[in-house]
Amino acid sequence: MIKGVDASAPPGTETCAGAATAFGRSRRAGRGWLGALAAVLVVVLVTALPARAQPSGEPLDVVATTGMLGDAIKAVGGERVSVTTLMGPGVDPHTYRQTRSDIGRLTRADLVVWHGLNLEAQLEKLMHDLARRQRVVALAETALPRADLLADEDYPDRYDPHVWMDPSLWERVVEAARDALIDAEPASRAVFEANARAYLLKLDELDDYSRKVLESVPPKGRVLVTAHDAFRYFGRAYGYEVLGIQGISTESEASLHQVERLVGELAKRQIGAIFVESSVSERNVRALVEGAAARGHTVRVGGELYSDAMGAPDTPEGTYLGMIAHNVSTIACALGGDAGQPPAGVAPCKK
């Protein structure tokens, strides 16, 4: 089934359930009152963890699962944090499994932050187990009310985790990161709050840039076709129709029927550019190009987008700000828009 999102569709109406979402509904399914009691005990144990009364000479040791979370912690924590990111450039968080060295880093950390919302599906059990004895926070899952989330079309009880594709939603995750750092080291509150304010202003600027550039694409051309369905929040935020070959999770494989249907859409609607992703195989995208050619329609790869992982360290795309600015610039240029002057460090796209 071709995946899409209508920018005008109303969001859900539920709200987060605090500790219940923090420690996962699936873990408690079928356990009755014993499961509920266990969840309460976990909350008590985690909230009772001691915080640093005064900053020591050593920075807080923070482990983040994804590059986007690690970047947020660095921006807010500054010199008061030392951040280790488990998943580097090009790594798919949907399928990532912990290594022995990961477990060592996690158990030694002062604070562990993960995304939640079933993004790190293979790490969920480990995270819940760690939360019984140390400070662990699912930042996106606890920061965002369900009314702001998009449902997973394949799994009605789940939500699309790719919230970083909308900078206005990501701001709330950054605020949750600030609060988690303050909880871990209250004496550094002023530092964390000042850093967060400065970074949130940059996110506002990024959102303004993105909106201006993406509006330069002719309305008929505002169709984004990608390797998997990671851009639905992007589409909702900026008024783009989004079609993914694979579903929200790359664990699900695209069928031949899905590819054929999307080839038909490309030819029928004369869509001229589609996009590969840095953390997903190009195989299905290349199949679309070849399938469209067989029907007499030429479609090109408009560029590589960063979806579930940032770019290489020490490059503009190796930060959240640079990653999103790169995506916006690449999409606008490929679809007939004008990227204008991108933020510092982001190379202008070439049409």
Image (cartoon, helix red, strand yellow):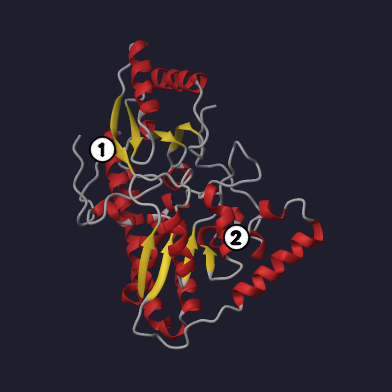
Q: CA distance from mark 1 to mark 2?
A: 43 Å
Quadrant occupied by the N terminus: top right
Label 1: which secondary element: helix
Q: Position of residue 237 (x, y in %)?
A: 45, 48
Marked residue nearer the N-terminal end (1 or 2): 2
Image quadrant in which you'd find residue 38? bottom right
Compared with 4, 107 (above or below) is below
115 vs 24, left or right, is left
Mark in front: 1 vs 2: 2
Compared with 110, 9 (above or below) is above
Report the residue marked by disc 2.
Answer: 128
Q: Position of residue 94 (x, y in %)?
A: 48, 44
Q: Position of residue 85 (x, y in %)?
A: 38, 59
Image quadrant in which you'd find residue 318? bottom left
Please name the residue shown 54% across and 63% down the image: 143
Please name the residue shown 30% across and 18% down the image: 298
Q: Position of residue 304 (x, y in %)?
A: 30, 38
Please name the residue shown 24% across and 54% down the image: 316
Classify 10 Å Cα crowding around label 1: few (below 14), some (14-19), many (20 and above): many
Q: Amino acid at mark 2?
A: His
Report the residue marked by disc 1.
Answer: 333
Compared with 2, 305 (above or below) is below
Image quadrant in which you'd find residue 350? top left
Quadrant occupied by the C terminus: top left
Please name the residue shown 42% across and 39% down the image: 240
> Does the image show residue 339?
yes
Foreground pick, 155 / 23: 23
Residue 321 - label: none
Q: Amino acid at mark 1?
A: Cys
